[in-house]
Amino acid sequence: GDVARARIVGAHGVVSRASAACAARESNGIGSMRFKSAAHSRSSFARGVAGTRASRPSARYGTVAHAYADADGVGAAFEGDIGAERKHLILVDGLSFVFRAYYGWSARGDGLQNAAGEDTGVLYSYANTICSLLELRPTHLAVCFDAKGKTFRHEMFVEYKANRPPTPEPLLDVIPKVENLVRDMGVPLLRLSGVEADDIIGTMTRRAADDGFHVSIVSPDKDFYQLLSPRVRMLRPSKTNKGDPFEPFTVEDFRVMHDHAIEPKQFVDFLALVGDSSDNIPGVEGVGPKTALPLLERYGDIETVLANAATVKGKRARESLLSEKGAASAVLSRRLVEIRQNLTVPSLNEPFLPLDDLRVKPPADGGLAAMRAFERYELANAAERWKRVVRL
């Protein structure tokens, strides 16, 4: 039948409520986009991470060079002047956005489908996320995924992430499709056996920052706080779905969040004390944030805290830190939460990947692979947006 144009991304890239109503009335030349239920047409498409408004600087986060501020719709949020010769690397925590898109679309049971009955909501959302990031005009970009199987952290602690429920089968099915779509869109996809995406991001962040880059880590995961620096910020998914799809989070934001008691590099010590239930990190029994912050403000790191455990005022926390079990748990927890920043390719004993391999450049095939993928999944609007972004 007639194809639904579904002007899901409006004039400024914002996903609008009214756009759903247009879906059944308008047509284009690439397949059809269908909704599983009428209820979906009454809901906002601004779920997950899809869509972004036209890029313009944000006063909230300050400015640096006009060339950068004009290109970056979420403001500069870096210290100093990037200048005309700026080098800006964006690293995406790939799997986190698959989960966000899945639970914002397909898991509800009323997401997008193509004519073949394939769920395409996650792919639509992910394609728009990539477009949003390309609109920031980075010089370098990569999406990082976890490798399958256990990692070195499981070898240290068999219960690492053991509290998480199994990944739903539909989500397992869509992950390879997302990975292929990312590659088809011309974006490097990075993974390394035995380590997590976090460690790849940590390694590339350190190398890029040391080489004069500014780095944006795109993730909602607080574990990346430890990597923040004057040259490194996070771009976290916006909670409002209004305006920019990402909210910068900087060193100064971290300091304010933690009452200026600790610096980002101390966040691993903070998690070592308080634990992290999302990853099943045990921490130290009886030590919460209100205890951990002043301890780290006074002593600096976990080793010095343990050496001065007898001075801790709270009885329960003091006894835990003085105990062999508590001290061992703190040390283990720190090893688990610390993101590696020096990965090498074991077989070659050399750096993981040349930074130049991540440079943003026109698709080598002229965009054919991406357009075939958009056609298969009937993502007409994402296709048009991507062509504008990469200037095909």
Image: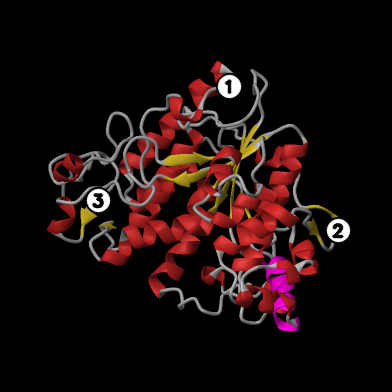
Residue labelled with disc 3: 33
Residue 293 on the magenta span: no
Q: Residues within 10 Å of mark 3 (few under 14, many from 20)?
A: many
Amino acid on which disc 2 is placed:
Leu
| Pointer 2 with pointer 1, Cβ within 8 A | no
Is residue 306 rendered to the left or right of residue 235?
A: right
The type of residue carrying mark 1 is Val
Q: Foreground: 3 or 196?
A: 196
Do tag 2 and tag 3 residues touch (Cβ < 8 Å)?
no
Badge 1: residue crowd in 10 Å (few <14, some 14–19, many ≥20): some
Location of residue 155 (image quadrant): bottom right
Alpha carbons under labels 2 and 3: distance apart: 46 Å
- Mark 2, Cα crowd under 10 Å, few <14 / some 14-19 / many 20+, is few
Q: Which residues make up the magenta segment?
A: 324-336
Q: Reply yes or no: does residue 325 show up in magenta.
A: yes
Q: Earlier in the sequence, mark 2 or mark 1?
A: 1
Q: Residue at x 59, y 57 (%)?
A: 223
Q: Of tags 2 and 1, which is closer to the observer?
A: 1
Residue denoted by label 2: 348
Residue situated in front as seen by the camera: 102 or 364: 102
Q: Which residue is mark 1?
A: 64
Nearest-to-viewer mark from 3 and 1: 1
Q: How many discs mark residues in the rendered view? A: 3
- Which residue lies at the image location 80% right of the left edge and 68% below the top edge? 307
Mark 2 vs mark 3, foreground winner is: 2
Q: Is disc 2 placed on a helix, strand or loop?
A: loop
